Amino acid sequence: MNDAFRHMKLDFRSSIPIYLQIVDRVERMITEGILKTGDQLPTVRELATELRVNFNTVARAYRILDDAHIISTQRGRGTYIWEEPDENTLLDLRRMSLEEAVRHAVDKLTSLGFSPPEILEAVQHQVDKRSTHPDVQDKDAD
Amino acid sequence: MNDAFRHMKLDFRSSIPIYLQIVDRVERMITEGILKTGDQLPTVRELATELRVNFNTVARAYRILDDAHIISTQRGRGTYIWEEPDENTLLDLRRMSLEEAVRHAVDKLTSLGFSPPEILEAVQHQVDKRSTHPDVQDKDAD
DNA sequence: TGTATTATTGTATAATTGTATCATTGACAC
DNA sequence: GTGTCAATGATACAATTATACAATAATACA
């Protein structure tokens, strides 16, 4: 299993359900270029053992990612990153101004106890990542 | 279920509400060392049956203990004595929650056609605003 | 090869867990 | 009386787990 999955920590106390936390982690690994097109994900049972949850919980996360065409799960075969990941199609989007959106996001984060400089740094980090890992399409990576 | 819970007698005539009595008993079991970090508590329904009260009453007690970070209730999994996460885990979780929130926000905005530098600049703007006028909450912006 | 057998994969469904919401009860002030 | 409010109960719900299952792959053997 990809080492990145080993370091995937979950917060069992969070009000965010575990299966959504898993969805999030996988999406992030794709965005960051850790997972590429065609890569195999851990089996539901492997990942479940690693995370100490029931494999159905992992299966539920995979199911969501599958519905969103981010991954492709095949009974008896395994789970793979979808051939043409297009994360932008996954998001239910609303129209809002940039200013407004940013203000809301920053509001939310400061209310969670993050300081503005901290937030700025995180955004900087995100933006950097996007210029370092632009649309990776490496089919023969395995 | 831990035997200690079996001997947990409640006073239904007391003016002290049942849920508070339960809170008290659990706290006592912890200070007495009967319950240790990570131990699983009876399910709300188990304990409710044992004490002959409605399971919502037990749930209410558990909720209070959960808010106080004495126990950790997890839907579908059960209830456990709180384990204080070590410093590193805390920092990890905090960092992850920030990263994920930022990633989602940036995802959303780029999918709306804003470029990363553009987003970064908007955030910079927001952050500046807050450090110059820390009290103002920009009431009329929506 | 071909095929039977076994192991491994994800899937479907029901049971178990805590949560949210509203209804009922009972004590108490007026 | 009756209005109010906290405590408790009833019910429906959501997340997770347990179990049995079906599809695919891997293996053994003729």
Image (cartoon, coloured by chain):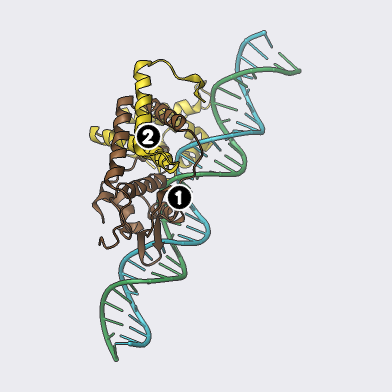
Chain colours: A brown, B yellow, C cyan, D green
Depth check, mark 2 against mark 1: the one in front is: 2
Chain letter for mark 1, please. A
Question: Compared with residue B64, is residue C15 higher up or lower down, i.e. above or below?
Answer: below
Q: Position of residue B94 (x, y in %)?
A: 31, 33
Residue placed under numbered mark 2 in the picture = B119
Residue placed under numbered mark 1 in the picture = A89
Q: Amino acid at mark 2?
A: Ile
Locate the C terminus of chain A and report the quarter of the image it occupies. Answer: bottom left
Locate the N terminus of chain A and report the quarter of the image it occupies. Answer: bottom left
Instruction: Examine the rendering and report whether any part of residue B80 can be seen.
Output: no
Name the residue: 33% across, 59% down: A43
Q: Amino acid at mark 1?
A: Thr
Residue closest to the eye, B15 or A107? A107
Residue closest to the eye, A62 or B5? A62
Name the residue: 33% across, 30% down: A119
Q: For numbered disc 2, what is the local secondary structure?
A: helix
Name the residue: 29% across, 31% down: A121
Image quadrant assignment for residue A113: top left
Residue closest to the eye, A74 or A141? A141
Q: Position of residue B126 (x, y in %)?
A: 38, 25
Per the model, the C-alpha gap separating discs 2 and 1 is 20 Å
